[in-house]
Amino acid sequence: MIECDNPFWNFSIAIYTDPEVAAECLTLQRRLNIDVNVLLFCAWIGSAKRTKLSDEDLAAVEARGRPWHDAVVRPLRDIRVELKRSPAIEDNAVKELRRDVAQIEIRAEQIEQARLFEMADKLVSSATEITAGDAIRDNVMALLRRNMSPPHADGTEPPKVERIIAQAAAYSLQ
């Protein structure tokens, strides 16, 4: 039985409520197709466990999240976004349906996060321990590098992650 209410979920809720963190996460999702739950996990394990993930660890985390994310979370997000674009969104019943889908999407993300949380102890034992700030930055940047190939080929600036890193570091001090 997966543990949906866990320290990783609490961390995610706490830092994602910052509008700048949410904006950075959504930009990474749009521009690099990064799974925000995996991104938050990389920040959390650095913050809470002071663990630097290896490339092999990152691959395992992405592989753990991908099936659920692709089969459940992404289709729910697509439905929610499509409802927002629909001319029928002016209808109160459609607005209510969109809110319901958004709540189900959040619940699906919580389940994905619970599945990632199950990996934490194994990853901690196989990884190098460093300061929380360094672990957070290293993990987030390593995930970006895995998802940027070739880096900035489109001539755009690299995505910003400073607020995610700062909020995760602040959370580690609580």
Image: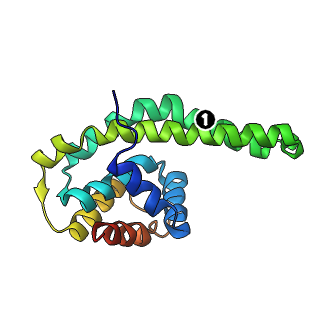
Q: Nearer the viewer, residue 7 or 148?
A: 7
Q: Nearer the viewer, residue 71 or 4?
A: 4
In the rendered image of this protein, does residue 47 appear above or below residue 117?
A: below
Looking at the image, can residue 72 be seen?
Answer: yes
Where residue 91 appears, as percent x and y from the top left, is 89, 41
Instruction: Give left or right: position of 143 versus 119.
Output: right
Residue displayed at 28% across by 63% down: 136
Instruction: Give left or right: position of 124 versus 174.
Output: left
State which quadrant residue 130 falls in: bottom left
Indicate the secondary structure of the residue bearing disc 1.
Answer: helix
Where residue 105 appears, as percent x and y from the top left, is 57, 39
Where residue 36 appears, as percent x and y from the top left, is 45, 50
Instruction: Give left or right: position of 133 versus 92.
Output: left
What scheme was used to colour the molecule? rainbow
Where residue 108 appears, as percent x and y from the top left, is 51, 36
Q: For the residue marked with disc 1, what is the amino acid?
A: Leu
In the rendered image of this protein, does residue 9 appear above or below residue 66?
A: below
Residue displayed at 86% across by 42% down: 92
Which quadrant is the C terminus positioned in?
Answer: bottom left
Looking at the image, can residue 154 be seen?
Answer: no
Q: Nearer the viewer, residue 156 or 165?
A: 165
Residue displayed at 50% across by 28% down: 71
Which quadrant is the N terminus positioned in?
Answer: top left
Residue occupied by mark 1 = 76
Instruction: Give left or right: position of 34 versus 89.
Output: left
Residue displayed at 75% across by 36% down: 97
Q: How many numbered marks appear?
A: 1
Badge 1: how crowded within 10 Å, few (<14), some, or many (20+)? many
Q: Nearer the viewer, residue 29 or 145?
A: 29
State which quadrant residue 103 falls in: top right
